[in-house]
Amino acid sequence: MKEKRSIILKEDELPDTWYNVIPDLPEPLPPPMDPPEGYSRVNDLPNLLVGECLKQEMTDQRWVPIPEGIQELYLAAGRPRPLYRAKNLEEKLGTPAKLFYKSEFYSPTGSHKVNTALAQAYYAKEQGFERLTTETGAGQWGNALAYAASLTGLECTVFWVRAVYRWKAERLKFMQIFGADVFASPSTQTEIGKKLYAEDPNHNGSLGIAISEGLQDAKNDPKAVYCLGSVLNHVMLHQSVIGLETKKQMEIAGEYPDVVISCLGGGSNFGGIALPWMHDVLTKKEDIKFIAAQSEVAPNLQGEYKYDFADHAEMTPMLKMYTLGHQVTMVPIKGDGLRYHGSSPILSLLRHLGFIDAIAYPADEIHVFERAREFVLAEGFLPAPESAYSVACAIDEAIKCKETNEKKTILFNVSGHGFLDMDGYAEKLGLIQPPERA
Amino acid sequence: MKEKRSIILKEDELPDTWYNVIPDLPEPLPPPMDPPEGYSRVNDLPNLLVGECLKQEMTDQRWVPIPEGIQELYLAAGRPRPLYRAKNLEEKLGTPAKLFYKSEFYSPTGSHKVNTALAQAYYAKEQGFERLTTETGAGQWGNALAYAASLTGLECTVFWVRAVYRWKAERLKFMQIFGADVFASPSTQTEIGKKLYAEDPNHNGSLGIAISEGLQDAKNDPKAVYCLGSVLNHVMLHQSVIGLETKKQMEIAGEYPDVVISCLGGGSNFGGIALPWMHDVLTKKEDIKFIAAQSEVAPNLQGEYKYDFADHAEMTPMLKMYTLGHQVTMVPIKGDGLRYHGSSPILSLLRHLGFIDAIAYPADEIHVFERAREFVLAEGFLPAPESAYSVACAIDEAIKCKETNEKKTILFNVSGHGFLDMDGYAEKLGLIQPPERA
């Protein structure tokens, strides 16, 4: 059989269940806990999250049916998405490794975030909410939720980490086209925001602070509910659609991965591509190496494994996770979606048990963007800055295979496109040209 | 059967032939001619165009095999592309019409232009050329050729209409990422450019001028060949892959279009979606209404049907086409890809014979962008400014169906995405927000 350049699934091959790794974990997942003092954040959760999502957060059902309404929304968002063999890149690298990548960059808003945004919006609408509130770092999540709100007939308010809001003017416009109400965070719309803004009107903000603002905003309005784009178990569940599709595709290609790679901030795209494969490792003793690509600015998988808050203002329950501390400050980077203090409790436990490796790339991001450019020149698709970490890690692994002459099969996720991040590329690659060169 | 929300073709359903309408035309297509005076442009064609493309330009073969190498490149570029039923939009409009749209916006560089860019680059490489030269208006074509050159290992030089070069900084960076050498046109790199630049260093430029520059540059370098992104017969041929896929998809959906719509500048995306359906009209007497959506700034289908040059400097042969005059000046618009003085000889003949209707939207583009926003809010995909004309026309037709209660099936092409055109949207929709609203 001729080796396939792309593996496309038809619309009736869209998975009709999500995969929940919790019942397959070698140890029970440590539950959310309350801090030693203060009110019960755990009891407060039903006031913060969509009911069905909260139910999914705790479920031990392995295969969770995807409601037909959400399947329809997935189709409308262009799922299933193709899997590609990076043949051109393999040739240019001269590696004996086979490289496969999943095309989450075909998303309408630019990333895999739509997979959980659509599910959360759908359930929120069912529950009678009229408005979604959220935080965003890189802007991909806020944009995905604004999109999902638009398609399901809801309003959407976004608190956007100020340091990123400043340089992503295009992304802001895109959220506005979807009708979202967007604030730079810390904002003057919430108590915690007001306090930090008063202390420093140029405050860079952080994902932790923006989460606090989104939570407070929703708490103050009974018609509103807060949605989180990463970290939590129900987000991992929704994102499993990426890996489930990919498993079907690799089977069609007649291939099985030795290595599965993606970038990891809170963990949503990493969990999405990795956990359905982790199922094989946990239940069938398959041998797959998982590598999370991170930034030295936020190497949370190299932090401490302990209970910590998910937000700056300590409004969330404490989660057992690898964390750098919920009030840590981190310098802005182009791959801003990776700049979060903690990583998903599920992925943290798996990391703790030795199932996940991690690598942290230097804060200057030069290597990452140079690798991304190699990918663009060979494959033609422009990765988002965050996805560039995944690409860089995959190329680095492929080059190692060349040195050791190992014919590994490497699977990686390209979680988003970089069309709205051209400035990041220009800056990191030094693409300077006079404004009207003739 | 449940109505389908999307129709996806698998990789082995990629068409393996292009469709050439020439043998099915009711009248012979008027050939390129030389002007009454001066050297023979017709005899000069082999020095200007890729050999295989020139052969295809004249062929009367109805089904032209797509070489395996080009099929591979089409797969790498994400073909076949899904067809979507705009169910959400239909509901919001309350129209009895069924709306289907083709997703050329999934292109790696942002538009359908890759379909002919890859073919031309492939044939140029085969013929031993090392560099491609071209013009670009909106930037989509130049970007597509830069991409195709990168994937096939060629260099690429782009002459970009200065008025557009000025406001599309992101698009310029994207071309640079692919390694293209980009000049604002009129440039100081060619005779014709130098002359016009000297007369007015702020010259807005035009597609006609940029074509002349691309032609001159290629003529001066035996290793270089010029590629044109629209108008010519071989471009219509390559783009037929859009319509051929769509025909398979509509058949799967169990639907047949009453109306086929797209925007039309030179005609490449319109021809791409329309001509394979035109085959049914010409050979099976099917009744389909074809509508070309244009701008009042460049309503070339309402111009004169006559022999005219394709470029400003009169380096091309004269083509029998609807034209506004090859040295006309046209004010810049956001949908700049529609701003060309003439339209494809094939489409012009079909227009002349009454097979194609045309509508020209006002130069302020407000209606077009407002319609595009309705599409975004319902369907979630952001059309390129040019594609917004197609969307606007489709929505206008759907609203007419509501008024007359006609259950028409309307098929339209969304030829590209607008991720690099956010400023155009912001300006036309009045999306103004303080830079750091808190």
Image (cartoon, coloured by chain):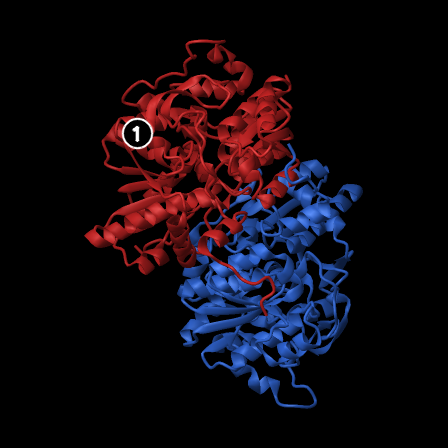
Chain colours: A blue, B red
Q: How many marks?
A: 1
Query: Which amino acid does the dot numbered 1 rest on?
Result: Arg
- Placement of A163 over or under A406, stated as above or below: below
In this rendering, is residue A301 above or below B351?
Answer: below
Could you tell me residue A173's position as x and y percent? Answer: 53, 57
Q: Residue at x 34, y 19 (%)?
A: B29
Quadrant where the N terminus of chain A sits is top right
Task: Please give the chain letter of the residue carrying mark 1.
Answer: B
Q: Residue at x 31, y 18 (%)?
A: B28
Q: Nearer the viewer, residue A84 or A250?
A: A84
- Measured as percent of width and height from the top left, residue A210 is found at 62, 72
In the image, taking residue B164 as reference, residue B57 lies left or right, namely: left
Tag 1's secondary structure?
helix
Residue B298, picture quadrant: top left
| Quadrant of the rendered image containing residue B360 | top left
**A147 or B334: nearer the viewer:** B334
> Is the C terminus of chain A in the top left, top right, bottom left or bottom right quadrant?
top right
Question: Which residue in the protein does label 1 denote?
Answer: B351
Q: Residue furthest right?
A: A403
| Residue A120 versus residue B299 in the image, above or below | below
For the question of whether residue A401 can be seen, the reply is yes
Estimate the x, y position of residue A312 in percent, counting from the top left: 67, 76
Q: Residue at x 61, y 26 (%)?
A: B198
Of all residues shown, which one is farthest toward the front?
B199
- Whole-percent x, y for residue A137 in the image: 63, 64
Q: Is residue A408 visible?
A: no
Quadrant location of residue B411? top left
B277 displayed left or right of A333? left
Mark 1 Cα shell of 10 Å, populated few (<14), some (14-19), many (≥20)? many
